[in-house]
């Protein structure tokens, strides 16, 4: 196999395949163990791929596991966008915003240790940002044998973090990266989240009302426990990880202020129930903002890998308990360790995030970050530095954790769009390439996530 130069990048020249159909060509790629096609709207074809990955990329003797990847295929000559959730693979066809902007192909990569992409037995010490980035590197290098146009990467929240980490360890795998609402908790014990939340939004009365309803809920705790118990009985919920329904309720109340600003908008301040409202009315409001049964075993089960990483490398926001003193039964327990089974050992690596931050500031290239002005996760964003090149940061005015480029001002959206198209090497167009037949990530239902994810 020879080497050719593509826009200044050294890439492997494509091999010669006997097969001509893309499905058959995918089956011949290194590491691919399964290819299944599912229906979608032309001009795309949608494939479910399974890659065989090493449990430990430093030690092949540790065995392998299978990792799920979705592929939206349009044309091997079109740009490729790698979309990382940082969580589970959605399993349905969709196009992320950058994919629409460049009218490209897209892969959707499931993060290691999120089921079913979990080694058995699970050695949790192998769940770290370098191992996961190397998973992505293996996938990119394999698929580049077919898709040899420009590659970009993107993801939102933990997916945006994941995309950044991949670039740090494998900076030449993709040409540019577009992370959305990606937090950067550089030094975990030093937080500014609560300072941010003290001033978020434009209405002090909204902040006061949110704190008031939190206190009122804890003061009327038996009423809400009774309603929650009905849900527990109906849905057969258990609370072995956090210990009890009472503990779950308290944790959810603490998180609700953060969760409100993460997912709601300023206009939703009007939805906060008034003082003395019926318990069911308040309970129903929590179901929208942050369910009081959010920390059941069943809700936590799929997100233990996230909490493990938050408690070993990523860091997490400090819970704000200042105005709830005297009302808490379990103060100081709203931390990642509480949400991971005790059988799984956890030790924090204080060097992982400063290393990422330093790379962005001093070596990062072609990074475009999008944040929401009112999103608490934007309190500790990635910041560009003296060594960062051809990179940009945008804020959506009044935006929350769902902020996108198409929510920016017209001028900013046009500039960001032009940058992404330039990176992809496609002809600039001022508008996103949208389709009524193909869903975008914006049109998909939000996944059910525990608070502050």
Image: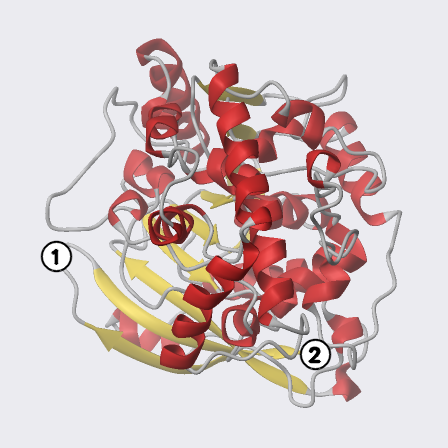
The secondary element bearing badge 1 is classed as loop
Q: Are marks 2 and 1 in contact (CB under 8 Å)?
A: no
Position of the N terminus, as image quadrant, is: bottom right
Count of numbered tags = 2
Name the image quarter holding residue 104. Answer: top left
**Considering only vertical position in the picture, is 117 above or below 138?**
below
Counting from the top left corner in percent of width and height, residue 383 is at 68, 24
**Considering only vertical position in the picture, is 164 above or below 1?**
above
**Considering only vertical position in the picture, is 62 above or below 349?**
below
The secondary element bearing badge 2 is classed as loop
Mark 2–mark 1 Cα distance, whole angstroms, equals 36 Å
Per the image, the residue denoted by label 1 is 42
Say which mark, if any, is on residue 55: 2
Name the image quarter holding residue 130. Answer: bottom right
From the viewer's perspective, tell me whether residue 55 is left or right of residue 367: right
Choose the circle earlier in sequence order: 2 or 1. Answer: 1
């Amino acid at each position: 196999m020879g080497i050719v130069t593509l826009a200044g990048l050294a890439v492997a020249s494509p091999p010669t395949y006997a097969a001509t159909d893309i499905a058959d060509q995918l089956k011949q790629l290194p590491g691919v163990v399964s290819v299944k096609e599912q229906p979608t709207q032309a001009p795309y074809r949608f494939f479910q791929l399974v890659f065989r990955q090493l449990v430990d990329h430093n030690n092949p003797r540790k065995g392998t596991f299978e990792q799920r990847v979705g592929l939206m295929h349009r044309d091997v000559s079109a740009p490729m966008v790698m979309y990382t959730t940082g969580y589970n693979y959605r399993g349905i066809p969709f196009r992320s915003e950058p994919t629409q902007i460049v009218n490209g192909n897209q892969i959707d990569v499931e993060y290691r240790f999120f089921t079913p992409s979990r080694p058995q037995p699970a050695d949790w010490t192998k769940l770290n940002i370098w191992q996961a980035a190397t998973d992505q590197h293996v996938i990119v290098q394999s698929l580049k044998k077919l898709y040899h146009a420009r590659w970009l990467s993107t993801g939102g929240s933990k997916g945006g973090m994941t995309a950044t980490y991949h670039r740090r360890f494998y900076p030449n795998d993709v040409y540019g990266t577009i992370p959305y609402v990606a937090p950067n908790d550089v030094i975990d014990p030093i937080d500014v989240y609560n300072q941010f939340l003290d001033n978020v939004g434009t209405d002090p009365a909204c902040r006061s009302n949110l704190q008031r309803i939190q206190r009122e809920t804890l003061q009327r705790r038996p009423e809400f426990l009774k309603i929650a118990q009905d849900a527990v009985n109906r849905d057969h919920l258990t609370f072995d990880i956090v210990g009890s329904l009472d503990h779950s309720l308290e944790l959810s109340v603490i998180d609700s202020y953060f969760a409100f600003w993460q997912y709601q908008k300023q206009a939703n301040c009007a939805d906060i129930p008034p003082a003395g409202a019926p318990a069911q009315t308040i309970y129903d409001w929590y179901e929208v903002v942050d369910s009081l049964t959010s920390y059941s075993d069943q809700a936590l089960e799929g997100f233990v890998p996230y909490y493990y990483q938050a408690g070993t490398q990523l860091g997490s926001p400090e819970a704000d308990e200042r105005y709830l003193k005297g009302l808490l039964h379990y103060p100081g327990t709203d931390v990642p360790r509480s949400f991971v089974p005790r059988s799984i050992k956890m030790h924090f690596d204080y060097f992982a995030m400063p290393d990422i931050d330093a790379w962005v500031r001093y070596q990062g290239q072609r990074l475009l970050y999008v944040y929401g002005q009112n999103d608490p996760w934007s309190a500790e964003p990635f910041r560009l530095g003296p060594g960062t090149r051809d990179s940009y940061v945008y804020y959506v005015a009044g935006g929350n954790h769902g902020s996108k480029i198409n929510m920016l001002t017209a001028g900013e959206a046009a500039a960001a769009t032009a940058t992404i198209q330039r990176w992809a090497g496609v002809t600039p167009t001022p508008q996103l390439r949208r389709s009524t037949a193909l869903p975008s990530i914006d049109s998909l239902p939000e996944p059910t996530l525990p608070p502050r994810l």
